[in-house]
Amino acid sequence: MKFDNQDTVYGIHSLKLVLAVVVVVIILLMYLTSIPDFIENQLGISQNWVIAIIVLLYLMFFGYFIWMDAAFVSYNDEGNKLVIRTFKLRPWGGKKISMEIPHSEFYKYEIVSRWPKKQLHIWVKKGNQIMKYPPVSVVSLTAEQFQNMENSLKQLSKV
């Protein structure tokens, strides 16, 4: 089985971009029109506070994806090895990780869910040693992709 969550990643990036444009347009409208006067008369909030609130809401939205550990995940168990490629959707520190695990060395897996994060932990057995790979964030997978991945890992698991 082979899949990736590229469509989800594109959707997240597109939404971030659209919202950034919307925030810039609102800020421009706040400086170029009489909207701030209307808002101040109706709500009693000054122009600077409205801009600060809008920017803060955008930053919270942006930060949510960092907090939940959203990541691109490519999964492939075809052939004689399991290949997982991933990178986190962060503006900085998005280290790319590629795991290529022969089916014969795959030992076990575990899904750890602590809201809002969901991580896949993989162990391999080489000789007498059992080693753990770095966790992979799987929170951005669709329900179907997650179920397919879990079914595949159950078949490979030796524990």
Image (cartoon, grey):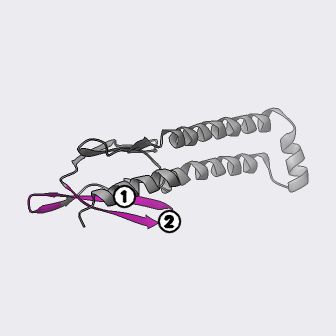
Q: Write down the region rendered in magenta.
A: 106-130
Q: Is residue 111 magenta?
A: yes
Task: Say which element carries label 1.
Answer: strand
Mark 1 nearby-residue class (10 Å; few <14, some 14–19, many ≥20): some
Farthest residue, direction left: 127
Task: Say which element carries label 2.
Answer: loop
Image quarter of residue 43: bottom right
In the drawing, does residue 156 fall left or right of residue 140?
left
Q: Amino acid at mark 2?
A: Trp
x, y percentage for residue 13?
Answer: 55, 39
Q: Quadrant of the N terminus?
A: top left
Q: Is residue 141 visible?
A: no
x, y percentage for residue 149?
Answer: 40, 53
Q: Give the mark count.
A: 2
Mark 2 nearby-residue class (10 Å; few <14, some 14–19, many ≥20): few
Give the camera-side residue of 70 and 38.
70
Q: Which residue is mark 1?
A: 120
In the drawing, does residue 92 fall left or right of residue 122?
right
Residue 98 numbered tag: none
